[in-house]
Amino acid sequence: MSNKRVNSRFLRSIAGIVVFYIGLSFAFYFDLINTYIVIGALMLVLIITIIVLLRYRNEKSKVNKITWIFALAALLLIFDAFLIPYENFTYEAVFHAEPVEVAADSGINLMGVGVWNIRSIEDKKQLVADFESGSWGLIALNDVDNKERYHSRNNNLLQFLGFRRDAGSVMAKNVGDYLGGTTDGVGKYLEREDIEGNSAGLALALTGLIEQNKLVNELEFGVTGSLNEDGDVNHIGMVKEKLMIAEEKRYPFMIIPSENADEAEEVKKAQNLDIQIFAVSHIDEAVELINRLNEEHRK
């Protein structure tokens, strides 16, 4: 067989595996198949490649190209094998978490929630009943689908390989850059090992300004929002849950990112909340808001 024909078959084989893998990934992502079917399909491709490799083991020109196909199939299998630990996650339980006032009497309360991933339990009604019979403070019990598994795998793998920093580390750097260093209260908070996500960024930066005597506050605020290195306030998740906790704590004001404003107003209306919600797109807006409300309070 000519080299040209061998090369043509090699390229078609590579293209075929890539197209097959894309289709397999789409089927998984949209919950049409589970992790074990993905792994099984890739193992089948690998077995077929091994059989072909053995069949042509004495033909060097073919063996080299089949080896490349084998390597590609093996890499895809290894990559998707990292989905296996996530397959048994069935629900994500969201719990009430006490707001955190990083600096005493700052009036800036970090709004967060507790999250617990539940494995291998399918009976949602029984789970809810079990939580409600205890003192867990369950807010929501969310289904874990393949989209969540897929993104969790990718994020954790990128962090493990050093291509992406975890959200907590990014938040700490952004807050430190904005403040020109960390203050006592902010620094102690950032040393905690249970920090997840970056939604405390805005609250931490505001707390730091109070500790630096650059901002004076006599009111109670619930605050949530991620902060980038330029002081921009960005979208966060679980707005409903955080608003409900702030309402329960009877905070008069809640500061959120502008990107979450529509969602927050829908929640306020649906849940009939009394809390006043203020949306900001930059920390300077939050500072101006706090100054204005404090001035009105003092009159």
Image (spheres, grey):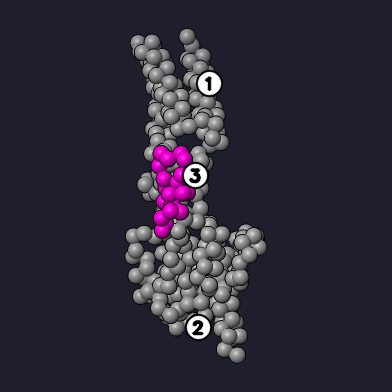
Q: Which residues are magenta?
A: 116-136
Reply above or below: 20 against 255: above
Of the 4 image quadrants, the one containing the C terminus is: bottom right
The amino acid marked with disc number 2 is: Glu
Q: In the rendered structure, does residue 126 fall within the stretch colored magenta?
A: yes
In the image, 13 versus 170, the foreground residue is 170
Report the disc number at residue 139.
none
Q: Percent position (x, y) of residue 236?
A: 53, 59
Indicate whether 173 appears above or below 140.
below
Tag 3 or tag 1, which sits nearer the N-term?
1
Question: Which residue corresponds to mark 1?
Answer: 12
Q: In the image, 290: left or right of 159?
A: right
The structure residue drawn at horizontal position 56% and vertical position 66%, both measured from the top left corner, is 256
Q: CA distance from mark 2 to mark 1?
A: 70 Å
The span from disc 1 to disc 3 (Cα, nearest Å) is 50 Å
Residue 218 - label: 2
The one nearer the camera, 36 or 82, is 36
Are dots 2 and 3 in contact, CB under 8 Å?
A: no
| Residue 292: in magenta span | no
Which element carries disc 1, helix, strand or loop?
helix
Residue 92 visible in the current orientation: no
Q: Give amino acid for label 1.
A: Arg
Residue furthest top as drawn: 1
**Label 1: how many residues lie within 10 Å, few (<14), some (14-19) or many (20+)?**
few
**Residue 188, image quadrant:** bottom left
Q: Position of residue 193 (x, y in %)?
A: 34, 60
Q: Earlier in the sequence, mark 2 or mark 3?
A: 3
The answer to whether 142 appears left or right of 296 in the picture is: left
